[in-house]
Amino acid sequence: MHFPSVFSSSTASPLPTLSDSAMDPPLPVSSSEPPKDIFSEPPADTFKDPLNKTSAEKAASGGLSKAQAAVPVKVAADEELDDLFSDSLGESGAAPVTDVLSAPQNDVIKKDIFEEPPKASTDLFGDDDDEDLFKEPLGAMTKKPQGSLFTEAKSEAKAARPEQSNSAAADLFTEEAFTVTPVVAAAKSSVNTSSKTNGLHSDEEDLFAEATVELSLDSPHNDRRKREAAKPSAPAPSLSASASTSKPQPKTLEELEEEEKEDTFDLNISVTNPEKVGKSTTSLSMFRSKQFTVRRRFSDFLGLYEKLSEKHAQNGYIVPPPPEKSILGMTKVKVGKEDPSSAEFVERRRAALERYLHRVVSHPSLLQDPDVREFLEKEELPRAVSTQALSGAGFLKMINKATDAVSKMTIKMNESDVWFEEKLQEVESEDQQLRKLHAMVESLVNHRKELSVNTAMFAKSVAMLGSSEDNTALSRALSQLAEVEDRIEQLHQDQASNDFFIFAELLADYIRLLGAVRACFDQRMKAWQRWQDAQNMLQKKRETEAKLLWANKPDKLQQAKDEIVEWEAKVSQYEREFERVSATVRKEVIRFEKEKSRDFKKQIIRYLESLLQSQQQLIKYWEAFLPEAKAIA
Amino acid sequence: MKGSNEDSAQSVNGSSIKITDVTQDGDTLTFAITSQKSSSSAGVCVFRTYEDFEWLQQGLFSQEDVPGLQGVIFPPLPSKPLPSTSLSQAKALKQLGFLALGDEWMIYCKALELYLQQVAAHTTLSKSKALYSFLNSSESPGKQCGKKGILNRLSQAMEEMRKEGHKDVDEFFQSERDSSTNLSALFKLSTEKFLDVVLNKQRLALACGHFSTSLHLCVNQDNPTAVAFSKICLKLSDIIEAVKINYEKVSDNDISTLGLGLDLESRYQEAKREMLFRRTCKLVELETANRNSERAKPNKKAIMEGVQKATQKEFDIISSVAKQEIEHYHRDRVSLLRDFLICWCEKQLSTARESSALLSQHLDACKKFAV
């Protein structure tokens, strides 16, 4: 609900702050209304501007996404702002940084923008990044120094949302990925979750010491960067003792920083993949440069999904679904409503896109898709064709339609492998459970927000008391109390944001993912159906041949024989396809489940850390207040 | 609280007064009150209902032979308890505020206890026969018809409210009245807002409970991966449960310390205002008497002057008693608030530390979780 210090990202990257942030729990939260809120400062305005600006740019480029079309009037205004923005960027960049500094968590955000913590949890922030950056010759534009950033689109600034989660997510998913051959990838389910846990990076370093490329802007610690993926054939290095039990997979990560420009707002997404330089393993040589910063519109993401879905869904792959389009949210943002909810919306979307991308690149097969590479690398993408079908509602509708169509099939699939049937049931019951949980979390978030509001009112009333009270010591104590309550209010807000971003979004993501899982089961059904149909056709052709033989029509006989051959081939092809799809589905589902567990575990740890930090802050506040109370005489 | 020890044999040791038990019978609550005389260690236990408390309060108001009684700030008696069986929680909250919260009327009992202790600690009121009878008589005195004594503001007619704004002759009192009005409103507001916060925390605890229970339902033992996921869900369930318990403790702390303190302070402020109002009424009466006396026809003049002199005397006594009371009040309320604030802070600190330790344990356990 707060807008992370987007601006902080630019400029400073003050190393010291970054390291500070390392200590902090992942979610940078502060920042909504309170004084520290950077949005109250000029940068906040610029925040609006980039939005407008980008829309302006977009408008200029001629493509108006649907959402934007809804607010055509805005375009003109945007253009003006464009200039404004470019000028103010520097300033905005600077200002927020300072603000951000006051809030440790924000530092993290800053960091995020510029560097992508490769995948890990928060503590990845180190000071080394910058050095590393310059050490490595980078092919592509690197975002590192603020300067480069600014050369990019101005909009870079935005979005520094807690990246940790993303990086973490990336970690989770990247674990198994990266092997060139599917075989290798599939087999290892072990994940080194431990690598993800906060602070356990050292193992990585040891493991991948030989990794060459590393730029990882984001990973503060050099060791982290060393995740270099050894060639797929390289033996998976065993994690150092500190790591968890599982063995880490060699990882290939490429580092990227993306700036996503929605029609009216910018998103900064960081995906990091250290790239391996110098070794040309197929999987690695895909990416030419180590760091990329590209701008993508929201519709580009949808377009990516569409392409991936077309190509892979029918083979039984679980293609991660993109975040949903929200006309209402976007309209609010475009209209420039500067209220917490629109900031929250932007942040939410940015985080969702980042997670989406992480899932895509951590999928071993999808990572190799040229469309993905193009998405990550190419400067300008052709505007995605009508992505309406992929709006949130549209997406779900699509899934549901597919599901319905399949279930309407009169032929009940002769399930040779009961595993699939059971799994499908599990998936469905899980879907229900997750939806229920999601509703609970939302209720929790609302209560916390309410608590925050009530606490603020209480704080105000106590402040008034303090100023009216005659007894000086009591008056001072009451004023102190008002301040304590104010800070507690901030804690409540932060906690609400955490609840939301950690859990609500996690659950929502998985509900959508389960939809994708169901879709892939459907694809398998379709493959089966094709096979069965082919078999039926073959049977018919055989019958025809038999009839022709009996009727003794030699001229048509040859044709019939040809057709039989043709259909025999088809039957065997479809059978093979079905088997292949089944195997893929099976593999995918297993991988999905493991990732789900890892994902949830990671988020829970993140949540716990934020709870713990909250409590510790609370302790500090009470400890500071106690002497004041005792001093009343 | 005030725990003064009186010397006279008859007097009760204020700090020894405790409400040890409360039982509910339908709509009636019966309180068990124990106390000790200051001169002996023998304890007395009596059973009283709310009516008895009202009787006591009335008795205090209607004491005769106490000069300047109207200048006394009477310890405020909490409102009548509304057992939740008969009325909804919302109504109880409206009437009693914080005193309606807490388990088993504990907070309410505490408030009653404080009331008795304050009466017993008051130099004038502690000598009242009504108090003695209340604390010692085995019979319930509440059934007796109380004499009409000083009326509380609540029973005063609306037209008397006008007098509230009557200008004072004494600067000290004028400023006391002004600040009283102001502070009393602010305290009331703060108490209300704090109540909102506490109720919100309770709702939050409830929501956490629901979430935690739902997580429990996500158990699936079919295959190893599902088992792993179930374990994670259960772990989260435990964590959320811990969060819920923390919120419950925090809100309990709030209620039993600061909530009670703010409630008491609010009611005491009201009591002070009432005293000041009574004095103001007397002032009005005096000024009327003065006017009457001046304008009186010669045949009535002597009587009027007599009335005037008597009223003047009463007023002066009331004022001097009031001044003393106000000084005591200022001193006592500050120490009261101080105690409550310290208690609140210490309790919250200790709860936060406990919670922090527990969360830390959970965090360590989670990190070791093999997935």
Image (cartoon, coloured by chain):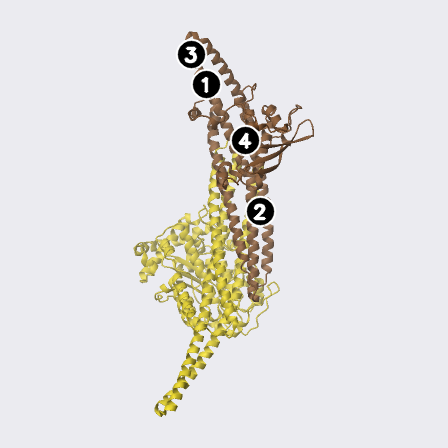
Give x and y (percent) for residue A129. 50, 60
Residue corresponding to mark 4: B77
Element type at marker 1?
Answer: helix
| First reached walking from the N terminus: tag 1 or tag 4 | 4
Check residue B294 in the rendering and tell me which mark sits there, or answer none. 3
| The color chain A is rendered in | yellow
| First reached walking from the N terminus: tag 4 or tag 3 | 4
Residue B298 relative to residue B36: left or right: left
Give x and y (percent) for residue A91. 40, 52
| The color chain B is rendered in | brown
Residue A65 relative to residue A606: left or right: left
Contact, mark 4 vs mark 3 (Cβ under 8 Å)? no
Identity, as a three-letter code, of the amino acid under mark 3: Glu
Q: Nearer the viewer, residue A97 or A323?
A: A323
> Above or below — where is A7 with respect to A274?
above
Disc 1: host chain: B
Which circle, 2 or 1, is nearer the viewer? 1
Check residue B352 in the rendering and tell me which mark sits there, or answer none. 2
Measured in 3D between alpha carbons, the distance from the residue under mark 4 to the one under mark 2, in whole angstroms, is 34 Å
Identity, as a three-letter code, of the amino acid under mark 1: Glu
Residue A143 relative to residue B123: left or right: left
| First reached walking from the N terminus: tag 2 or tag 1 | 1
Residue A541 relative to residue A477: left or right: left
Residue corresponding to mark 1: B285
Residue at (37% x, 64% y) in the render: A389
For the residues tagged 1 and 4, is the chain the same?
yes
Which circle, 1 or 4, is nearer the viewer? 4
Element type at marker 4?
Answer: loop
